[in-house]
Amino acid sequence: MASRSRTRIQLCGKLVVDLDGHRIEGSLTGKQSRLLFAFLALNRLRPVKRDELIEALWDEHLPQAADVALRALLSKVRAQLGHDVIRGKGELEIRLPSDTWIDLEAAVEAIHRAESAVVQQQWQDAWWPTRIALNISKRDFLPGGGGHWVEERRRMLDEVRLRAYEAIAAMGIGLGGSELASAQRSAHALIDEAPFHEAGYRFLMQALEAKGNVAEALIAYDGLRSLLREELGAAPAPATQAVYRRLLEIEDGETGAPARALKTMLFIDMVGSTKRAAELGDKAWRELMSSYREVIREHIERYAGQEVDSPGDGFFATFKKPGDAIGAACAAMTAVRRLGVEIRAGVHAGECEVTNRRVTGIAVHVGARIAALASSSQILVSSTVRDLVAGSDIEFEDRGLQALTGVPGEWHLFAVSFCSPRERRVASSSGTTAVPA
């Protein structure tokens, strides 16, 4: 277990600044002093120009002599913190230990870990990081502070909180039993905070369905449909309508029973997403994620795949043929490089339990764990998949026997070293040049 950082900064809720065991937030008197410290702390990995700092501190309400005002404020804060903490003149840097813990950053990192665990259906692994993200995101960022950058961080916290509710709802539905009540509460919280965010209604419908309250689930859908029609003149999204149609079938007694089916499973995860998000900033990161999801979904659909789940930057999809799953992974891996993104992927084939389009079972866990072992720009497959595509143009490199976390025994894994001509044509049509995966 990693040691706990001795420098901890809480910017959400009550300000707490613990520098190596010394609480110094009381020294940061005045709103501007705290804004200056917070901005430099969150941007501690790069130098900050004076003009940027002035804009962050005063936004549209610049004092007449802004540079003079900044110089006075810096002198004050340096006196409060110590003159060696903030360095530089034209460009300013704050000196903090490399393992400094800041609650806002911890919330973003925690929700990413939680969503990665959810897509792998590792419910217990998702529990703790989800609670961290939710507890931090429920607090206001820099209470009393203002400015564009402060509002942007608050919006980011709002998004983290909604994502945390989604993860809790998914966990509750995945675990079932007494945890369905938690899923239902989180779904209601989503609806209360974001009434036009349809995920909350879908989770509520699924939780009620799992509890056997199909009629209540249908009432929840009707509430959403009325809201969208009256306020926007719109209808629920296709994904929400699909849940509704399934509920109608259950009401009619046509489905609902678990079924065993042979599936090929593809798991995809973005490499280094937390670091990339920190480097890009909120707006650029949201734009990148939108393009990234579009590219991945395009190639899943192109190879006749069915998206099962996609929390955060992860994807779980099923295919009828293992060659199609590998082809989708190869083509997607090449295509996202245009975005400056690298992914890892894992493919496994086995019998799963399919209940109302939810795919579960040991084979799903195996596929998720295989993906977790893959390196950047690598596609790992099980020996089952390798055997099923024997005779195709796909080539592999032996990666030997590997232990998969939480899965008994050792598993013989192979890395895709070369895709078939079809994948090269698909990558070419996407405006990229195919390379060995």
Image (cartoon, rainbow, N blue to C red):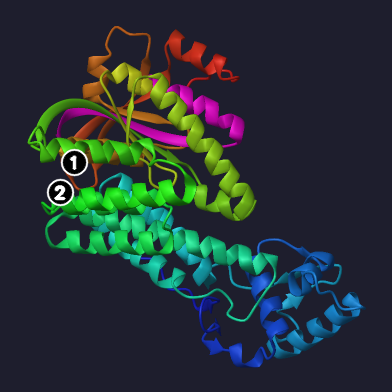
Q: Looking at numbered disc 2 in the image, what kind of residue is underneath it? A: Val
Q: Residues within 10 Å of mark 2 (few under 14, many from 20)?
A: many
Membership of 346 in magenta stretch: yes
The correct choice, above or below, for 154 with respect to 11 in the image is above
Q: Amino acid at mark 1?
A: Leu
> Above or below — where is 73 with respect to 93?
below
Q: Which residue is mark 2?
A: 214
Hey, which quadrant is residue 392 in on the image?
top left
Residue shown at 44% from the left, 24% from the top: 299
How far apart marks 1 and 2 lie (CA) works out to: 7 Å
How far across and how far down the image is residue 224, in percent? Answer: 35, 50
Tag of residue 247: 1
Q: Which residues are magenta?
A: 327-354
The secondary element bearing badge 1 is classed as helix
Towards the viewer: 35 or 275: 35
Q: Which residue is at a point 49% across and 63% down the rendered structure image?
A: 158
Residue 355 in view (yes/no) = no
Label 1–label 2 contact, CB within 8 A: yes
Q: Quadrant of residue 80?
A: bottom right
Helix, strand or loop at label 2? It is: helix
Residue 341 horizontal/vertical position (percent): 55, 37
Direction from residue 193 to residue 149 in the image, left or right: right
Count of picture labels = 2
